[in-house]
Amino acid sequence: MLIFGAELHTVYLFTLIIVGCITILYLFFSEMLDGLFEGVPFVDPAVILSFITITSAAGFLLEKFANLSSAFNFIIACILSAIMTSLIYFFILVPLKSAEVSLAYTEESLGGQVGKVIVPIPVDGYGEVVIETVNGIISKRATGFENEPIDYDEQVLIIEVKEGTVYVKKYEPSLQFKL
């Protein structure tokens, strides 16, 4: 079958190459384009591009290797593409868009956390503490909240943070009684 003066498998192949290149460009510039389609729920360029790419790949393979009519090959390619695109959308794209994990932290968020002294804190001086968070280990300059010395390897409670310095006290875990 001829479309635009070319064999159908050639049209599928050129569509696959062109839309594949557009998909790669979209990967690089998707952050700029996401705002354009934010209000429309089912118009996601990644889904549309993946549907066309999978349809053209399946259509090319069916035209090349299956002895079916071109219309039937196109219908099968669209069905396969719809299934694959749905799986990609619901199992990859939706979880990725809802996962907003950031490695950033604010100084205010450190208050109330427990850390460990790695450089002893002298009276009226500075030492260093490390705080283990879900995002990794943070080390901060520290001083005693009441200007008390704190030894190496002591657990400390961060009382407040001012100008990059954490003010700490020795941590005394409360006793938990079992009833």
Image (tube, rainbow, N blue to C red):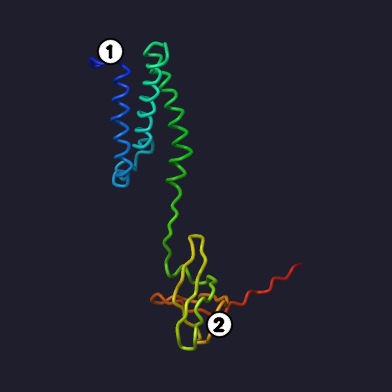
Relative side of 131 to 64, left or right: right
Quarter of image, res 19: top left
Q: Position of residue 140 (x, y in %)?
A: 45, 73
In the picture, the disc for residue 93 is: none
Graded by Cα atoms within 10 Å as few (under 14), some (14 to 19) or many (20 or more), the crowding at tag 1 reads few
Q: Position of residue 131 (x, y in %)?
A: 51, 69
Residue in front for this viewpoint, 44 or 50: 50
Residue type, mark 1 in image: Leu
Kindly give the residue lying farthest to the right in the view shown. 179
Q: Give the spatial CA distance, label 1 vs label 2.
A: 83 Å
Rendered position, 36 above or below 59: below
- Helix, strand, or loop for circle 2? loop
Residue in front for this viewpoint, 168 or 15: 15
Kindly give the residue lying farthest to the bottom in the view shown. 123
Q: Residue at (46%, 49%) from the top-left corner?
A: 99
Graded by Cα atoms within 10 Å as few (under 14), some (14 to 19) or many (20 or more), the crowding at tag 2 reads some
In the picture, the disc for residue 2 is: 1
Q: Position of residue 143 (x, y in %)?
A: 47, 81
| Image quarter of the C terminus | bottom right
Rendered position, 143 above or below 21: below
Quarter of image, res 173: bottom right
| Image quarter of the N terminus | top left
Q: Residue at (41%, 14%) from the top-left corner?
A: 72
In the picture, the disc for residue 151 is: 2
Residue type, mark 2 in image: Asp
Quarter of image, res 116: bottom right
